[in-house]
Image (cartoon, helix red, strand yellow):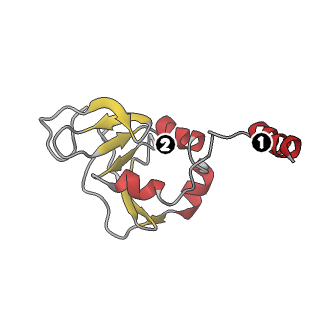
Amino acid sequence: MNCLCDKTLKLIYTDIEGYCGYQCPSCDAVWLPRKFVEAIKHTYHFTYAGFLATRTPLKQNAVQSCPDDGHKLVAYQLNNASFSECPCCASIWFEAGELQALLQNYQRVNSNTSILDKLDIFNLFNILS
């Protein structure tokens, strides 16, 4: 797959913000296949259905085509994040910094402390008092 901004540059499969995706080594744009977009739920309070319901289509359509299937991308905005989505495969193109802007709309799931760990801390306080 090649970058939408420079058709000669290959997108590199890499870790982006903790997710697998494809990134341009030059402009830092990101291409996330739908399954990787859906995986955001593992680290943020994110649902794909909620994402679809809250994004707003922009009046101007993206001029780029999907690097996977060639369909014309559709431009969307969600709060301060702009992105383009393929209407066929539902993969999303983020210009540099836009994925980070999208993620700011969701609270990170705190996986460091489980409820059982919190209960153990309360038990420790009870023992010490």
Pick the front one: 3 or 62: 3
Q: Secondary structure at mark 1?
A: helix
Name the residue type under label 1. Ile
Q: Dot 1 corresponds to which residue?
A: 121
Q: Quadrant of residue 19?
A: top left
Residue lying farthest to the front in this orientation: 129
Mark 2 Cα shell of 10 Å, populated few (<14), some (14-19), many (≥20): many
Q: Is residue 67 above or below residue 55?
A: above
Residue at (11% x, 35% y) in the render = 8
Pick the front one: 113 or 74: 113
Residue 124 at x, y percent in the picture: 81, 40
Could you tell me if the residues under marks 2 and 1 are in contact, i.e. CB atoms within 8 Å?
A: no
Q: Is any atom of residue 49 visible in this view? A: yes
Alpha-carbon span between mark 2 and mark 1: 35 Å
Task: Name which of mark 2 and mark 1 comes first in the sequence.
Answer: 2
Q: Is residue 87 above or below residue 61?
A: above
Q: Dot 2 corresponds to which residue?
A: 37
Residue at (15% x, 39% y) in the render = 7
Residue 74 at x, y percent in the picture: 37, 56
Residue 45 at x, y percent in the picture: 61, 51
How many badges with numbers are in the image? 2
Residue at (19% x, 37% y) in the render = 25
Mark 1 Cα shell of 10 Å, populated few (<14), some (14-19), many (≥20): few
Name the residue type under label 2. Val
